[in-house]
Image: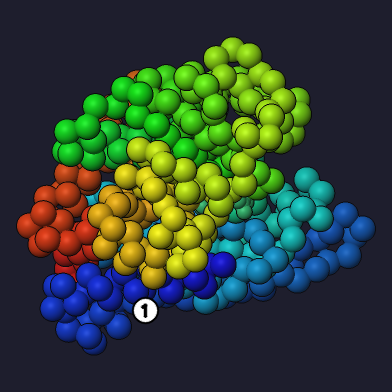
């Protein structure tokens, strides 16, 4: 999966490089990481025996500031994936103009088979092994797939023990009581909404009653649904991996009620919640994920997985704007077709970068020994996301390119790849 994501990123990067007339050798050099670290971790298991796991940290680029990127625990973690993801982190940070570079780490392991104690042993071992290479001014890891605030808490504790004093700024994504940041959970969705509203302002569309379809109702999808609902957008379709629902009445979905219903019933397709009432949907109200993507809406938000908008379905897409909150929801081939059809795509690398911005805030808060209020966090997030959008939008007008190409050009310029 990451392979496709990386392939698309490289294609977009090369398109931007071409527009900038970049020297090919410079671009090839830029793609390579500055440092690749691979160690074996020896972990004590609950049965008293030890097991060995392969662990990585790839540091791609620190021209703009310390390396920054998550650590994932997953059975398919591998070096190529780490390299690709670290490059993508460099680009994301550059786009939102954050003084961080890009990195990624991981352990090839199935953490779902681990007890809590074994997970703690693994997390602490990772820090002991990579200690020399990480730190608040060198490389700041954060959570990623299968790593969470509890794991970050163990990691900070281990780092602090070796260091001899508490170093909260060594990791981000920590629990609130350990220097974590308020509003973190909804930051990606909230950042996406700031960018969307910046676009609407530029194209002079009023938000009220704009019709929205959202694919995926996890962290990002449910949060964006709630934020948009509160602002007066009309949510007309929602889905999860098992299927979706579409509205057949005047009133839109109430995502707060859908969320409550989902907890009880487990499936979006059982939660037709318009207004305050939840019912089991009828046949006309149940849709597939493919049907959701093809609805005639103002705004389509893919917030689930990769490659959902592809060569096979692009011509059926009827949305006017696509806000890519998932990573890589559109293939490069599909992207060309969307551009030809004048569908405005707000690219993932900008739209979902609220998460990286919030990590920077957490680091800043810890470095300066401050505690930011939720209001402060959102105000600053809005400023950064809107500034990035405005810069990319202006660039796209100046160079007569789509927004995605403009965003990649912006990153290459900031990183002085020329
Ligand atoms: P999540 O696991 O919380 O939710 C994913 C949702 O997508 C679930 O509702 C799931 O049922 C649905 N889904 C899974 N497979 C599907 C399929 N085949 N068709 C339709 N729906 C499907 O994940 P998340 O954290 O909300 O992340 C969603 C996307 O956003 C991912 O692409 C992720 O990489 C990207 N993203 C997330 C963050 C973040 O802060 N969580 C930041 C940047 C990017």
Q: Quadrant of the C terminus?
A: bottom left
Query: The N terminus lies in which quarter of the figure?
Result: bottom right
Residue 250 is left or right of residue 106, and the answer is left
Query: Where's residue 56, x and y in %?
Result: 56, 69
Q: Is residue 32 above or below residue 175?
A: below
In the picture provided, is 178 more to the left or to the right than 147?
A: left
Q: Which residue is mark 1?
A: 32
Q: Residue furthest bottom?
A: 25
Q: Residue furthest front?
A: 284
Query: Whole-percent x and y of residue 112?
Result: 77, 53
On the rendered structure, is 33 left or right of 24? right
Looking at the image, the residue that sits furthest to the top is 276
Q: Residue at x 74, y 56 (%)?
A: 111
Q: Is residue 13 visible?
A: yes
Q: x%, y% of residue 239?
A: 59, 40
Residue 210 place in picture, x, y as percent? 35, 29
* Residue in the picture at 75% in, 71% down: 52
> Can see residue 128?
no
Foreground of the two, 266 or 316? 316
Q: Nearer the viewer, residue 68 or 333?
A: 333
Q: Quadrant of residue 66?
A: bottom left
The residue located at (28%, 58%) in the rendering is 341
Query: Residue most toward the left?
Result: 398
Q: Say which residue appears at 13% left-offset and 78% top-offset.
A: 21
Element at badge 1?
loop
């Amino acid at each position: 999966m990451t392979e496709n994501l990386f392939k698309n990123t490289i294609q977009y990067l090369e398109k931007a490089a071409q527009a900038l007339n970049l020297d090919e050798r410079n671009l090839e050099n830029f793609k390579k990481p500055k440092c690749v670290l691979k160690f074996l971790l020896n972990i004590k298991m609950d049965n008293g025996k030890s097991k060995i796991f392969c662990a990585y940290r790839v540091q791609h680029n620190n021209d703009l500031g310390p390396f920054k990127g998550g650590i994932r625990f997953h059975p398919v973690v591998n070096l190529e994936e780490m390299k690709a993801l670290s490059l993508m982190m460099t680009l994301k940070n550059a786009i939102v103009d954050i003084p961080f570079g890009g990195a990624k780490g991981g352990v090839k392991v199935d953490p779902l088979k681990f007890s809590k104690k074994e997970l703690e042993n693994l997390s602490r071992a990772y820090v002991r092994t990579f200690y020399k290479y990480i730190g608040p001014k060198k490389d700041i890891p954060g959570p990623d797939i299968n790593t969470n605030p509890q794991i970050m808490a163990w990691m900070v504790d281990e780092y602090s023990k070796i260091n001899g004093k508490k170093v909260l700024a060594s990791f981000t994504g920590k629990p609130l009581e350990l220097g974590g940041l308020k509003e973190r959970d909804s930051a990606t969705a909230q950042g996406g909404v700031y960018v969307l509203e910046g676009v609407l302002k530029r194209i002079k569309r009023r938000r009220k009653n704009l019709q929205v379809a959202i694919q995926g109702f996890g962290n990002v999808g449910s949060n964006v649904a709630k934020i948009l609902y509160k602002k007066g957008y009309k949510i007309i379709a929602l889905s999860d991996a098992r299927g979706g629902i579409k509205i057949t009445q005047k009133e839109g979905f109430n995502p707060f009620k859908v969320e409550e219903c989902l907890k009880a019933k487990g499936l979006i397709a059982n939660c037709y919640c318009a207004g305050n009432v939840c019912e089991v949907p009828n046949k006309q109200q149940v849709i597939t994920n493919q049907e959701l993507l093809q609805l005639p809406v103002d705004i389509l938000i893919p917030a689930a997985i990769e490659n959902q908008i592809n060569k096979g379905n692009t011509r059926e897409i009827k949305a006017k704007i696509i806000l890519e909150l998932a990573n890589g929801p559109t293939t490069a081939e599909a992207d060309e077709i969307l551009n030809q059809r004048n569908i405005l795509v707000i690219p993932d690398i900008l739209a979902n970068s609220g998460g990286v911005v919030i990590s920077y805030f957490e680091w800043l808060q810890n470095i300066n020994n401050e505690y930011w209020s939720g209001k402060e966090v959102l105000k600053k997030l809005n400023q950064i996301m809107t500034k990035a959008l405005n810069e990319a939008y202006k660039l796209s007008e100046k160079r007569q390119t789509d927004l995605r190409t403009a965003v990649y050009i912006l990153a290459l310029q900031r990183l002085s790849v020329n």
